[in-house]
Image (tube, rainbow, N blue to C red):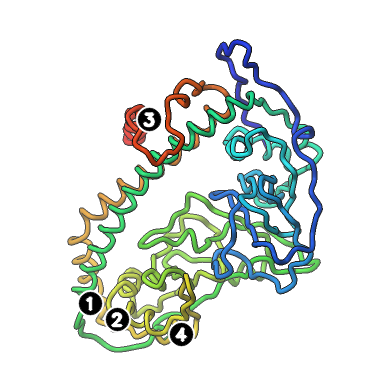
């Protein structure tokens, strides 16, 4: 793997010189165990380290015996050694326990939050990647001695605090912009669903069950022990990839499985992807897989519904958003405090009204005509969200590595980012510039 290089701070900072240290002097291993009473923590590329919900469908099942799980104290660095090259690392937000497969280090930072920003910034994720070994994608393993030889450029404690303060305000501003665009997408999604509901209400046709017009393929179980079998790494879709009306392939995970398991769980273009669990209003919503990644597997929390020749995949995906399917999932779902779930047996009994293929095509064209402008607006908002995230990535990297000196700006900011500040105006032009560059 190649290492992305960056320059050390180049601006004249007077006597406030940045210190060069190796991670060996900053990190020390922690090996405490046997505290199953502590909250369970997980680590992900998108979120860093977070407290895991017991009913989170995106993760492996929680074992009954947690005594062997490692203790991570608040501020400790937690690293998924197989995915460090992707950025699956971060500082623990609270005292908790993590998988025995993770690495845990005490982290010596004057301002721990600065260490979180630093380690998860793009230049330092690349350094962790360069310290990983492997021959197959998804099977790179972090080499700890090489990782601890990584040099970091650390500012004085006062500047670390200024950087954290500045980024807290900047992230609040970016989060606000993203939230506004997500609200717009949600409103337009509701309008699209109403169009489908109006068209499907009282639809004439042959009544059937989903199992009669399609086959339901279940996915692979993560964390399964395959013993001495030869494994190959494949990309796979998680629940997070299956969004309302679209597949989000911006972040694709890999899993190593035997060939027979890969064959059983490989997606085909035209499969209708459905989530097993989630919010009750999103449960069972479908999207057609277009085969954009081949081969690609799917997790067991995502069903792949393969239509027979009596029903169009696009029609089924639209039917799943209609009133009959929504009511069925609401009545049959297994509900917990935060989530709802279904299973392949219940899914197979879903009622489907089956007009002729010609009529199915006509309905799809009608839906497209009525929702085309909404789709354009949603697509634009989604692209803008992606650009805002990329802007955040660049901004954090520039600030934590000293390419941009934010001490003067931070000194003018209030203590909490919730207040209106001049930073909103200062970032507005930069955000607009980032968005306009993405439209070119």
* Quadrant location of the N terminus in the rendered image: top right
Q: Please give the label number shown on residue 423.
A: 3
Q: Give the SS element for disc 3.
A: helix
Q: Nearer the viewer, residue 186 or 409?
A: 409
- Give coordinates of residue 130: x percent, y percent: 70, 36
- Give coordinates of residue 29: x percent, y percent: 80, 45
Up the image or down, 425 lies above or below 58; here it is above
Q: Residues within 10 Å of mark 1 (few under 14, many from 20)?
A: some
Q: Closer to the camera: disc 1 or disc 2?
A: 2
Residue 440 appearing in the image: no
Q: Give the SS element for disc 1.
A: helix
Q: CA distance from mark 4 to mark 1?
A: 21 Å
Q: Give the SS element for disc 2.
A: helix
Name the residue: 42% across, 32% down: 414
**Disc 4 designates what residue?**
346
Up the image or down, 437 lies above or below 100; here it is above
Q: CA distance from mark 3 to mark 4?
A: 52 Å
**Disc 1 designates what residue?**
200
Residue 384 appearing in the image: yes
Name the residue: 50% across, 36% down: 393
Q: Residues within 10 Å of mark 2 (few under 14, many from 20)?
A: some
**Disc 2 designates what residue?**
324
- Give coordinates of residue 121: x percent, y percent: 58, 36
**Earlier-in-chain disc, 2 versus 4:** 2
Q: Are marks 2 and 4 in contact (CB under 8 Å)?
A: no
Give the left or right position of residue 243, taking residue 25 as reference. left
Q: CA distance from mark 3 to mark 2?
A: 49 Å
Q: CA distance from mark 1 to mark 3?
A: 49 Å
């Amino acid at each position: 793997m190649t290492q992305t290089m960056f320059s050390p701070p180049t601006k004249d900072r007077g006597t406030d010189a940045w210190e060069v240290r190796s991670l060996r002097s900053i990190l020390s291993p922690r090996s405490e165990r046997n505290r199953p009473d502590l909250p369970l923590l997980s680590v992900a590329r998108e979120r860093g380290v977070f407290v895991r919900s017991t009913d989170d469908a995106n993760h492996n099942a929680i074992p009954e015996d947690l005594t062997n799980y490692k203790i991570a104290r608040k501020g400790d660095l937690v690293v998924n050694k197989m995915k460090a090259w992707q950025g699956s690392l971060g500082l623990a937000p609270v005292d908790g326990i993590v998988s025995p497969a993770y690495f845990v280090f005490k982290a010596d930072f004057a301002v721990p939050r600065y260490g979180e920003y630093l380690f998860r910034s793009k230049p330092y994720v690349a350094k962790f990647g360069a310290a990983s070994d492997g021959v197959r994608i998804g099977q790179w393993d972090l080499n700890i001695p090489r990782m601890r030889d990584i040099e970091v450029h650390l500012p004085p404690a006062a500047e670390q605090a200024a950087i954290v303060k500045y980024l807290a305000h900047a992230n609040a501003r970016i989060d606000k912009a993203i939230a506004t665009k997500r609200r717009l997408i949600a409103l337009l999604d509701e309008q699209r669903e109403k169009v489908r509901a109006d068209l499907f209400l009282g639809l004439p046709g042959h009544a059937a069950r989903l199992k009669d017009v399609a086959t339901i393929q279940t996915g692979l179980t993560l964390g399964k022990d395959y013993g001495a079998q030869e494994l190959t790494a494949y990309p796979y879709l998680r629940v997070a990839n299956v969004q309302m009306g679209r597949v989000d392939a911006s972040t694709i995970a890999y899993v190593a499985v035997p060939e027979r398991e890969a064959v059983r769980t490989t997606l085909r273009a035209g499969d209708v992807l459905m989530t097993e669990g989630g919010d009750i209003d999103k449960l069972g919503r479908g999207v057609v897989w277009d085969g954009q990644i081949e081969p690609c597997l799917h997790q067991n929390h995502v069903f792949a519904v393969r239509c027979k020749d009596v029903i169009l995949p696009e029609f089924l995906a639209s039917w799943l958003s209609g009133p009959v399917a929504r009511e069925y999932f609401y009545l049959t779902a297994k509900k917990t405090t935060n989530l709802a779930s279904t299973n392949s047996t219940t899914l197979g009994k879903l009622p489907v009204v089956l007009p002729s293929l010609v009529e199915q095509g006509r309905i799809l064209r009608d839906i497209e005509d009525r929702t085309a402008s909404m789709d354009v607006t949603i697509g634009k908002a989604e692209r803008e969200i992606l650009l805002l995230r990329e802007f955040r990535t660049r901004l954090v990297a520039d600030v934590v590595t000293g390419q941009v000196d934010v001490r003067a700006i931070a000194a003018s900011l209030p203590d909490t980012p919730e207040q209106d500040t001049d930073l909103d105006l200062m970032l507005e032009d930069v955000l607009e510039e980032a968005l306009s560059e993405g439209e070119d």
